[in-house]
Amino acid sequence: MERVTDAVARAALTLASAHVVSPRVDAELLAAFVLGVPRGRLAVAEDFTPDQVDRFSRLVVARAARVPLQYLTGTAPFRRLELAVGEGVFVPRPETEVLVEWGLGWLRRHAADHSERPAVVVDLCAGSGAIAASIAAETRDVIATRVYAVESEPPAVDWLRRNVTAHGVRVIEGDVTDPAALSELDDSVDLVLCNPPYVPEIGASGLPPEVSEHDPHAAVFGGTDGLDVIRPLIGRVAALLRPGGAMAVEHDDTHAYVVPTLVSADGHFRDVELHHDLAQRARFTTATRV
């Protein structure tokens, strides 16, 4: 038997030595995961059993090797949801929650536009399904929606299905830039949301190991300048949207000028606007189909 507080303190030192950004928090979350209790209950939790000590120690070793915390616990929080995640899928980040909030606000403001039918929402490069599942879950009792999620990587598609099926989201396995993907919805989609791979390859050396070594490469990097997916994606989004429909695409903060410029240059959009995340970094661009 070992006191949880002692095990957590020792683990926090180990994680700090490995340069984990939040060593104490991660140690507590791993301990709570092993015990099956909320993190806030650790102070009154019973001592670790020998088996729990062994399991906790192995998790701490893995976290010190910079395996993402979410891969170790198998879940990632995103807005009101707990998403299943693991090897093969991009771990959703809090920054993307701002994009979802914008999308929900757009749907609320334009509810009258589709009062006679469900609003059609498409999540491109869906990954874990964080965007699609959140939209479906948070509009269920407020706005009628029909949500689609498109993803091309087979491992990610498996996680996607696990996360969105219960929310009624329709999963499409395919390339988001392929004109055939969802072609039956061309000119009829109300809202397109997208968190594509956008990190420039030239910036890979500065990324933490959790990203560079564990997040799927295809979900993170968008070519040398980070725009290999975004460039062709803009035209595909224009084809999907109905006149008056809207789009929001997440991008690198270094793309604060170039992505709005690319969207404007396409010629099918108006009201192009850059948005910032809670840290005031350029995070996503929105526009309306003319």
Image (spheres, rainbow, N blue to C red):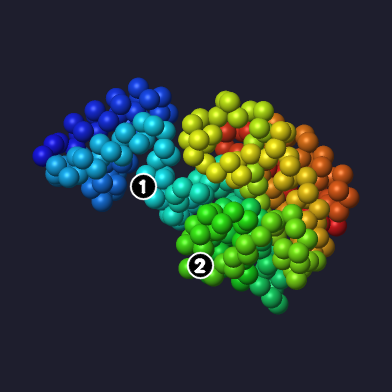
| Nearer to us in this view, 72 or 97 | 72
Q: Which mark is residue 73?
A: 1
N-terminal label among 1 and 2: 1
Regarding mark 1 in the picture, which secondary structure is present there? helix
Residue 131 appears in view? no
Going by the picture, which residue comes out furthest to the bottom?
116
Please state if 32 lies on the left or on the right of 246 as rendered: left
Which residue is drawn at the image coordinates 58% and 59% (left, top)?
A: 132
Amino acid marked by disc 1: Thr
Q: In the rendered image, which quarter is residue 264 located in?
A: top right
Which residue is drawn at the image coordinates 67% and 28% (left, top)?
A: 202
Query: What residue did someone put label 2 on?
Result: 165
Which residue is drawn at the image coordinates 54% and 34% (left, top)?
A: 212
Q: Is residue 152 above or below residue 259?
A: below
On-image quarter of the C terminus? bottom right
Regarding mark 2 in the picture, which secondary structure is present there? helix
Please state if 226 lies on the left or on the right of 209 as rendered: right
Rendered location of residue 262, percent (x, y): 82, 42
| Nearer to us in this view, 156 or 274 | 156
Rendered location of residue 186, percent (x, y): 78, 66
> Real-space Cα distance between discs 1 and 2?
21 Å
Which residue is drawn at the image coordinates 78% and 41% (left, top)?
A: 260
Q: Residues within 10 Å of mark 1 (few under 14, many from 20)?
A: some
Q: In the rendered image, which quarter is residue 228 located in?
A: top right
Going by the picture, which residue comes out furthest to the left?
1
Q: Is residue 194 above or below residue 25?
A: below
Q: In the rendered image, which quarter is residue 188 located in?
A: bottom right
